[in-house]
């Protein structure tokens, strides 16, 4: 069977099915964008969870320093962080103020947050002791 002259060129210039290729490309791009957005949203959620864990751990350590709980302040912070699926990376005591850095445990992204808890400067009594249960909390969202 012989083809008429120019048939091969006509087949190359034919755009039949081009819309399907463009449609598949657009769907692929939309799927990739959705995956990227979901990953970013998961990272933001983990960042907030880690900040909450650091905050709770710092408050627990400050409770021990204020005499409301018994034990080691940093040990108590570690126990509270572990209960939320986090670990204490650093724990610093500066008078009645505790500063705790917590990070997420697991295979997810490395996220850490630092929180400080202790009496407000104007709330401190003699020797820096605070009124029971009066704490100022500062959370530094240092995502890494």
Image (spheres, helix red, strand yellow):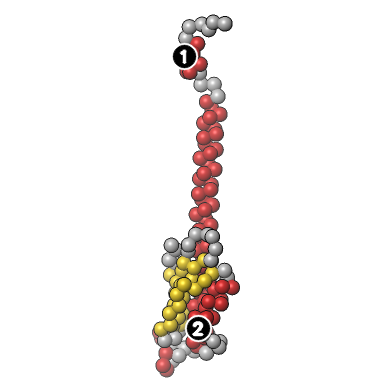
Q: Label 2's element?
A: helix
Quarter of the picture holding the C terminus: bottom left
Residue 132 visible:
no
What number is the disc on residue 135? none
Q: Label 1's element?
A: helix
Quick check: 56 above or below 72? above
The residue located at (47%, 9%) in the rendering is 6
**Residue 47, how many percent across, how many down?**
50, 63
Mark count: 2
- 6 and 45: which one is in front? 6
Neighbour tally class for label 1: few under 14, some 14-19, many 20 plus, Cα within 10 Å: few
Measured in 3D between alpha carbons, the distance from the residue under mark 2 to the one under mark 1, in whole angstroms, is: 80 Å
Quick check: 47 above or below 99? above
Q: Quadrant of residue 91 in the image?
A: bottom left
**Residue 132, how many percent across, how many down?**
52, 88
Q: Earlier in the sequence, mark 2 or mark 1?
A: 1
Q: Quadrant of residue 82 in the image?
A: bottom right
The residue located at (57%, 6%) in the rendering is 1
Residue closest to the far bottom: 126
Q: Which residue is mark 1?
A: 9
**Residue 122, how many percent across, how many down?**
41, 86
The residue located at (49%, 73%) in the rendering is 88
Q: Which residue is mark 2?
A: 73
Tag 2 and tag 1, C-beta contact below 8 Å: no
The residue located at (52%, 71%) in the rendering is 87
Residue 22 visible:
yes
Neighbour tally class for label 2: few under 14, some 14-19, many 20 plus, Cα within 10 Å: many
Quick check: 86 above or below 97? above
**Residue 80, how many percent across, how many down?**
56, 76
């Amino acid at each position: 069977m012989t083809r008429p002259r120019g048939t091969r060129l006509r087949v190359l210039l034919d755009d039949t099915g081009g819309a399907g290729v463009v449609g598949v490309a657009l769907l692929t791009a939309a799927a990739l964008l959705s995956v990227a957005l979901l990953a970013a949203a998961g990272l933001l959620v983990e960042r907030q969870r880690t900040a909450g864990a650091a905050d709770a751990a710092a408050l627990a350590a400050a409770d021990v320093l204020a005499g409301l709980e018994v034990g080691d302040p940093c040990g108590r912070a570690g126990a509270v962080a572990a209960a939320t699926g986090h670990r204490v990376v650093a724990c610093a005591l500066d008078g009645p103020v505790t500063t705790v850095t917590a990070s997420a445990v697991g295979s997810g992204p490395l996220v850490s947050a630092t929180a400080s808890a202790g009496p407000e400067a104007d709330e401190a009594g003699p020797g820096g002791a605070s009124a029971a249960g009066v704490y100022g909390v500062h959370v530094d969202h240092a995502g890494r």
